[in-house]
Amino acid sequence: MRVATVVAMLLLAGSAAAQTNQSAKSRGPIANTPDQTIKGSAMAVEGDLLTINGTAVRLMGIDAPDPGQKCKNRYGHELDCFKVATAVLANMVKGEEVTCTVTEQDRTGEKKGECRVRGVDLGAAMVARGWAFQYASLSPAYQKGEAYAQSKRLGLWAGQVEKPWQWRSRQVRQNAK
């Protein structure tokens, strides 16, 4: 096979893959359903949950401390890490227009997506500041941000904290006794 033919085939394959990726990005979990965009003022309900004009949207790919979850700061003093993480997110959205692209809705009807303020991904900002953890099993997108926060001992990484999914699992086990 001639080199020009191989190059042409590779270009066509790359173009087809790019179109497939683009069409996958332009629809939600149900085929041919576009992602939903929600814009407006937001309120932080949790460190990974916002309400925009009354619609709840969970930040996709991250997990922040849950209500009742405690952690310790660098000096060993206990603090309500749920309240702190929620306050950090609240400060990021205060007085700003938030744009959320909802890409999923789970079986309970909870909307999940990527939310931005002035072009900044709020999930990435929460992870990079150390107030949320990446959900590596769902997305590797925030891996570098988490590594940065951990290396600089920012936020939750400054002291001792149990990852939220581990904390929830432990709560279930303890409440089952």
Image: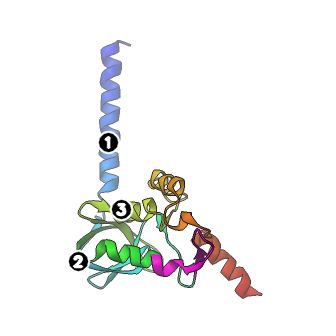
Q: Residues within 10 Å of mark 2 (few under 14, many from 20)?
A: few
The residue sitting at the top extreme is 2
Q: Residues within 10 Å of mark 1 (few under 14, many from 20)?
A: few
In this picture, residue 109 sits left or right of residue 55: right
Looking at the picture, tell me which residue is in the foreground, 9 or 18: 18
The x and y percentages for residue 80 are 54, 81
Where disc 1 sits, the SS reads: helix
Residue denoted by label 2: 95
Figure disc tally: 3
In this picture, residue 46 sits left or right of residue 10: right
Question: Can you say whether 129 is above or below 18 in the image?
Answer: below
Rendering quarter of residue 122: bottom left
Q: Magenta region: which residues? A: 69-84
Residue 100 visible in image: yes
- Callout 1 amino acid: Ala
- Is residue 92 a member of the stretch shown in magenta? no
- For marks 3 and 2, the one nearer the N-term is 3
Residue denoted by label 1: 18
Q: State how far apart marks 2 and 1 are (Cα).
A: 37 Å
Residue denoted by label 3: 31
In this picture, residue 112 sits left or right of residue 76: left
Looking at the picture, tell me which residue is in the foreground, 7 or 167: 167
The x and y percentages for residue 138 are 51, 60
In this picture, residue 49 sits left or right of residue 79: left
Question: Can you say whether 80 is above or below 29 in the image?
Answer: below
Where disc 2 sits, the SS reads: loop
Q: Are marks 2 and 1 in contact (CB under 8 Å)?
A: no
Q: State how far apart marks 3 and 2 are (Cα).
A: 36 Å
Looking at the picture, tell me which residue is in the foreground, 43 or 90: 90
